[in-house]
Image (cartoon, rainbow, N blue to C red):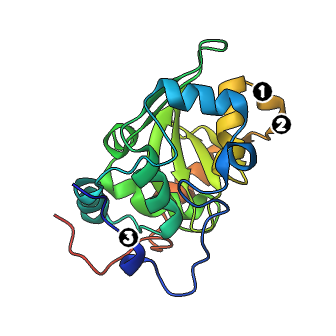
Amino acid sequence: MPARSFARRCPVGVARTMWKPGSNGMAGRFTRLVVRVLREAGWSPERRVDTGEVEALLGDWGFPIHQADADVLTEFGGLDCRSGSTGSWLRFGVKEALRWTVPAQVPAFGRIIGQPLCPVGHGNGCVWLVGPQGEVVWLQDEWLGYVRVESLPSALDTHFRGDYKRTAWVGFEEAELRRLLSDPSPKGVRRDRPRK
């Protein structure tokens, strides 16, 4: 079955991600380490998976789906990646990522960095979220803090190398966390579908 296209659901004016699925060859997109880890998990540059079930699940929860999120889910969805040299692991899957949250917390995801974020996976104790421009946010799964990385290729390289010195950890103070989780403003939440 061909992969579903999210293009018709991508809001007008949302920029494409810093990479396009299957484009740019190995040299420009991922480091050799990332290519090795992804290939061992079953990835190829031409890989595409049907995301209809995932799209419905995200919609039911109220998450926005931007082209950057769709690109990640279409190309990497279902992969279970592990770096033998560092022990770092990452499962690309929305269901795995949602195990660490409840629907009432969905609006808080959009308030973390002030833009909509969509869960795409879980690894090393963090929920992996992607923003509309392709930025990756690792949210510690107990909401203790997060890390921002400018792109998926950079996030994967940092993660599989275990080289976290390249990143800056942002911890949540108790009052800030309370505000994030209780603020009623719906930043980043799509309301065009009724929740189930």
Mark 3–mark 2 contact, CB under 8 Å?
A: no
Secondary structure of residue under mark 2 = helix
Q: Earlier in the sequence, mark 3 or mark 2?
A: 3
Residue at 45% in and 49% down: 75
Mark 3 surroundings: few (<14), some (14-19) or many (≥20) residues within 10 A? some
The quarter of the image holding the N terminus is bottom left
The quarter of the image holding the C terminus is bottom left
Label placed on residue 166: 2
Residue 35 is drawn in which quadrant?
Answer: top right
Which of 79/14 is in front?
79
Above or below for 192 versus 104: below
Q: Which residue has dot 1 on it? A: 163
User: How many labels were placed on the picture?
Assistant: 3
Secondary structure of residue under mark 1 = loop
Label placed on residue 6: 3
Horizontally, residue 153 falls left or right of residue 67, namely right
> In this rendering, which labeled residue sits more in front, label 1 or label 3?
3
Whether residue 171 is visible here, answered yes or no, is no
Label placed on residue 143: none
Mark 1: which amino acid? Asp
Tell me the distance, in whole angstroms, between the alpha carbons under discs 2 and 1: 6 Å
Secondary structure of residue under mark 3 = loop
Tell me the distance, in whole angstroms, between the alpha carbons under discs 3 and 2: 32 Å
Residue at 30% in and 56% down: 51
Residue at 83% in and 36% down: 166
Mark 2 surroundings: few (<14), some (14-19) or many (≥20) residues within 10 A? few
Mark 2–mark 1 contact, CB under 8 Å?
A: yes
What percent of the width, then of the height, locates residue 16? 60, 71
What percent of the width, then of the height, locates residue 57? 25, 56
What percent of the width, then of the height, locates residue 125? 52, 28
